[in-house]
Image (tube, rainbow, N blue to C red):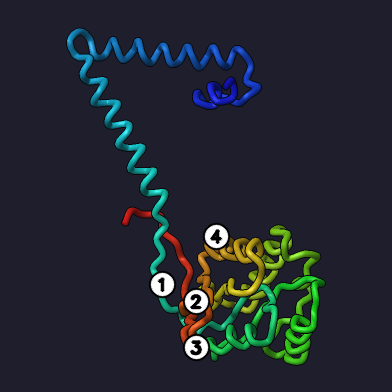
Amino acid sequence: MKIKLLSAFGLPEKAPIIAVLAVFSALMGLGMTADLIAGENRQWIGLILLAAAFGVYLFFNYKSRNLTFKPSPVDTNKKYLISIIPSNMSLLNSIKKYYPNLQKIYFIHDNFSNDKVNEVKKEIKNDKSLYSQAKYLKVKSIQEPKNIISSFDDILDELKNDSAENDDILVEVTSGQTLASLTLYHLSILYKIDVACLVSKYDESNQVIDNSTVPTTIKFDLKTV
């Protein structure tokens, strides 16, 4: 009960007594100031102000619940692609086939391996002209955001030295576990780089419909709908 009461006034559970007194003093001051402004026979203004405050609360609460997403096609003329290493050859080929003009692909990875991942790593190692072999792409764990951030910054530094523009770069978040993909997404937004994901349609059995996969620009906007 104490926790709920204090939290209702914006106070933590262990708030000192002076903080509690300060909050109650401020509330009393607000009430007395409101009485002074309203004066006699104008108390109805309080109802209008209360309704206005509640209306503003409802508006912003509704707005925050509507995260709109309008799918749009990706510019397939990108020259550079940044992603977490795909978990299998099928995903690698799916990502790669939509961008015929790629000059360099940067896949961030760690020591995790199985037969399918090793097959992808072997493919990357055999094609040094397309896949970056930079040591900074290998991190201790791709589930640690700071590792992703460090590699991402190194990639951008290298691309900047090659005179690449942000419009030439694409961040792909289809591969990689959730935390790594979220890190890449926020980095792309921070640096104003396009971010994409392969989006597919599914049938009633929750199976991907053939030829329904489309590379889609990922960008969310908070707005009312």
Kindly report the distance in space between the C-alpha atoms of the residues bearing marks 3 and 1.
Answer: 19 Å
Question: Is residue 201 visible to us here?
Answer: no
Label 4 packing within 10 angstroms: few (<14), some (14-19), many (20+): few
Instruction: Report x, y in % for residue 216.
Output: 47, 76
Question: Above or below — where is 71 with respect to 13?
Answer: below
Q: Amino acid at mark 4?
A: Leu
First in residue order: circle 2 vs circle 3:
2
Question: Is residue 200 visible to us here?
Answer: yes
Residue 83 image-quadrant placement: bottom right
First in residue order: circle 1 vs circle 4:
1
Instruction: Report x, y in % for residue 139.
Output: 78, 67
Residue 164 image-quadrant placement: bottom right
Front of the two marks 4 and 3: 3
Q: Amino acid at mark 1?
A: Pro
Question: Which residue is labeled 4 in the image?
Answer: 190
First in residue order: circle 1 vs circle 2:
1
Residue at figure coordinates x 57%, y 64% from the top left? 185
Front of the two marks 4 and 2: 2
Question: Which residue is labeled 2 in the image?
Answer: 199
Front of the two marks 1 and 4: 1
Residue 210 shows which numbered tag? Answer: 3
- In the rendered image, the quadrant that contains the C terminus is bottom left
* Pointer 3 with pointer 1, Cβ within 8 A: no
